[in-house]
Image: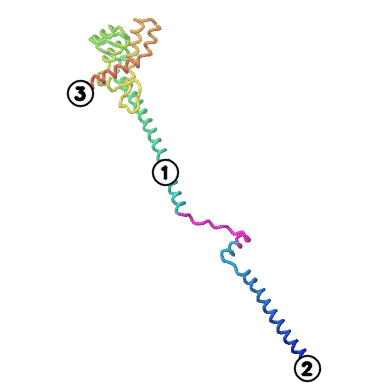
């Protein structure tokens, strides 16, 4: 009976031991699965975690097609703006060149007038001095005596300038001359020497004919009167060319 009890005790102990071992084995597998899952991570997530923990620099994503197109459009727009600025600068330079040419032509006319002066001193030649059939009206400018007599018979200042200008300049010179340089118009300024002579003769005539106040007002209209003459002459020549 005692032997039977011992045998039963040994059998129970052996069975219990096996059960405990199986239970421990199962529990060990259950614990190992979450640990393996926890250790298994996505490569991308691992790199992100490493960047966050290690402080690595973030890589910029490649430019898309839309972003590249935007950059090209910006470059084209900038080029157009630069081209427009350059065109404006060229236009300004052309305007300055035209003004310089006008001044050069005026200076050339003055030098030409000085070159044509004889050994006589212009300052010593009084206005109204006559030589043969011509008369001096100032600054070594001479016109026919008959033309001067007709000029002085004018009743109005505008008529005086009209006749005097036609006596000093030819029709072709009047047609292409002006007192002011107009943009886009192919004309030249009046010869400063001849214009000064006309102005001097005009002032003398006004002082002899009108009061000082009236004469001063009319002297300020000289350019206006000259422009009327040039416009009328230009229209007359154009009408003649169409016939």
Q: Residue furthest left?
A: 243
Left or right of residue 65: residue 111: left
Q: What SS does tag 3 mark?
A: helix
Q: Are marks 1 and 3 in contact (CB under 8 Å)?
A: no
Q: Position of residue 51 (x, y in %)?
A: 60, 60
Instruction: Report the residue marked by disc 2.
Output: 4
Alpha carbons under labels 3 and 2: distance apart: 155 Å
Dividing the picture into quadrants, the one containing residue 103 is top left
Q: What SS does tag 2 mark?
A: helix
Q: Residues within 10 Å of mark 1 (few under 14, many from 20)?
A: few
Q: Residues within 10 Å of mark 2 (few under 14, many from 20)?
A: few
**148 falls in the magenta region:** no
Q: Position of residue 30 (x, y in %)?
A: 66, 74
Q: Position of residue 16 (x, y in %)?
A: 73, 84
Residue drawn 30% across the image and 8% down it: 128
Instruction: Report the residue marked by disc 3.
Output: 242
Magenta-highlighted residues: 49-64
Residue drawn 69% across the image and 79% down it: 23
Q: What SS does tag 1 mark?
A: helix
Q: Position of residue 82 (x, y in %)?
A: 42, 41
Q: Which disc, if any, is residue 79?
A: 1
Q: Residue furthest right?
A: 2
Alpha carbons under labels 1 and 2: distance apart: 109 Å
The one nearer the camera, 69 or 167, is 69
**In front: label 1 or label 2:** 2
Which numbered disc flags the more N-terminal residue, 1 or 2?
2
The one nearer the camera, 32 or 107, is 32
Task: Answer above or below: position of 50 versus 175.
Answer: below
Alpha carbons under labels 1 and 3: distance apart: 49 Å
The image quadrant where one finds the C terminus is top left
Specify the principal SS of the magenta part. loop
């Amino acid at each position: 009976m005692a032997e039977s009890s011992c045998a039963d005790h040994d059998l129970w102990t052996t069975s219990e031991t096996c059960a405990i071992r199986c239970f421990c084995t199962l529990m060990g597998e259950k614990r190992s699965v979450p640990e393996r899952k926890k250790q298994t991570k996505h490569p991308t997530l691992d790199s992100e975690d490493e960047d966050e923990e290690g402080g690595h620099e973030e890589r910029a994503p490649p430019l898309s097609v839309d972003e590249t197109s935007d950059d090209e459009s910006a470059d084209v727009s900038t080029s157009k703006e630069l081209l427009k600025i350059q065109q404006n600068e060229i236009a300004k330079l052309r305007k300055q060149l035209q003004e310089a040419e006008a001044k050069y032509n005026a200076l050339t006319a003055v030098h030409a007038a000085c070159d044509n002066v004889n050994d006589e001193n212009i300052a010593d030649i009084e206005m109204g001095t006559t030589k043969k059939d011509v008369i001096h009206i100032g600054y070594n400018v001479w016109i026919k005596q008959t033309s001067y007599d007709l000029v002085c018979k004018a009743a109005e200042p505008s008529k005086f300038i009209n006749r005097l200008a036609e006596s000093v300049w030819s029709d072709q010179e009047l047609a292409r001359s002006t007192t002011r340089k107009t943009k886009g118009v192919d004309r030249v300024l009046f010869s400063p020497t001849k214009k000064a002579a006309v102005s001097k003769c005009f002032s003398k005539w006004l002082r002899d004919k009108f009061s000082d106040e009236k004469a001063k007002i009319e002297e300020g209209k000289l350019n206006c009167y000259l422009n009327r003459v040039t416009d009328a002459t230009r229209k007359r020549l154009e009408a003649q060319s169409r016939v």
